[in-house]
Amino acid sequence: MTDKTILRALRGETLATPPIWMMRQAGRYLPEYRATREQAGDFLKLCYNPDLAAEVTLQPIRRYGFDAAILFADILLLPQALGADLWFVTGEGPRLSTITDMAGVTALRPTTDIHETLSPIYETVKILARALPPETTLIGFAGAPWTVATYMVAGRGTPDQAPAHKLKDTDRAAFVALIDRITEGTIEYLDAQVQAGAEVVKLFDSWAGSLKGQDFQDFAVLPAKRIIAELKRRHPTLPIIAFPREGGDGYVGFAKATGADCVALDNSVTPEWAAEHVQIDGCVQGNLASHHMVTGGQALVNETRRIVKAFSGGPHIFNLGHGITPDADPDNVTRMIEAVRGG
Ligand code: CP3
């Protein structure tokens, strides 16, 4: 048995003070992150440099003492390992070669080949497993198949994921084949992270909110269920966090439907609603709006306390509703942590 607070919450324990970590906790709002990224050359070189990727993962742990470290990498490294071209345009975001039909899916590399590209990521995990303080939990992650597919089809981020919806609705066979390939790749990628030392894994479905009705069942619930079932078959005690962002009513019953141990909540739902409708099934994570890390002040403290109180009757991991943004003030993170821990 372990005493790590995040693992206790994920096993369903209600703690007097919720453990804390923060999405994108290693990122551009930190001057030490910007310095290391510069040393690496660019974002992708940083992801594939195990020593520097481990260094930026550790920076927010040293500065704030978070209860978990999340592996520094990106959800788009898996598409790259499957054969997509990937690059980042400064100030704009990711660009990938596009997949528009079955031929594009068939041309992807076999799942067994992904480790060739991704082995530096496993090296980062190994370094972190040795370097982290004993009380800090190491979280690995991947994108959920729908979110990864939206980037692989469109070749970039889109406001409404229209290209992926179009492929889904006009060439179902190609779209399902793509989801299946990503699902298989995600299982092997996360399995390798766990073998290297990740203690928890998280599936990021950032665009789950654009899947409605049966589509939400078919492409947010089912792929997560497949991935979780296979990972738990291989690693029966592995805790898994699922983040169907902007899932709304889809959050209700999501843990039961997928087998996830914890559902991460964005801030489009209130903590009082989520305590009643989602936390009844187990651990939840969230859900302070990221803008408080920019604006700070009494509103940050009040909203933090409100969330802690609303979730105090069950297992809870404090987090933001989405990643911290580059314009955030590092001192506001300190204030948030103080407010969670009773300040
Ligand atoms: O949370 C962490 O600290 C771990 C590292 C992490 C990154 N990306 C580093 C990153 C994680 C878990 C991700 C997940 C990710 N990546 C998601 C899902 C979560 C979410 O935010 O919705 C998505 C959609 C991506 C794809 C991606 N990567 C985009 C759209 C962008 C550009 C937008 C932006 O914020 O610049 C990235 C780049 C990225 N990934 C950065 C970081 C720290 C910024 C790159 C830089 O340093 O220039």
Image (cartoon, rainbow, N blue to C red):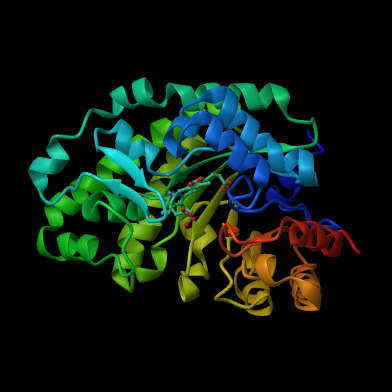
- Left or right: where does residue 221 sit relative to residue 124? left
**Residue at horizontal 47%, vertical 23%?**
120
Q: Could you say which is closer to the camera, residue 187 or residue 167? A: 167
Residue 253: image location, x then y, percent? 52, 66
- Left or right: where does residue 336 sit relative to residue 292? right
Extreme residue toward the right, this view: 343
- Left or right: where does residue 254 sit relative to residue 126? left
**Residue at horizontal 64%, vertical 62%?**
320
Residue 1: image location, x then y, percent? 78, 33
Residue 202 appears anywhere in the view: yes
Asked if 144 appears above or below 79 in the picture, the reply is below
**Residue at horizontal 47%, vertical 70%?**
246
**How many marks do you count on the picture?**
0
Q: Could you say which is closer to the camera, residue 173 or residue 100? A: 100
Residue 31: image location, x then y, percent? 66, 45
Please identify the quarter of the rendering in which residue 334 is found: bottom right
Please identify the quarter of the rendering in which residue 285 is found: bottom right
Residue 315: image location, x then y, percent? 73, 59
**Residue at horizontal 63%, vertical 73%?**
274
Residue 237 appears anywhere in the view: no
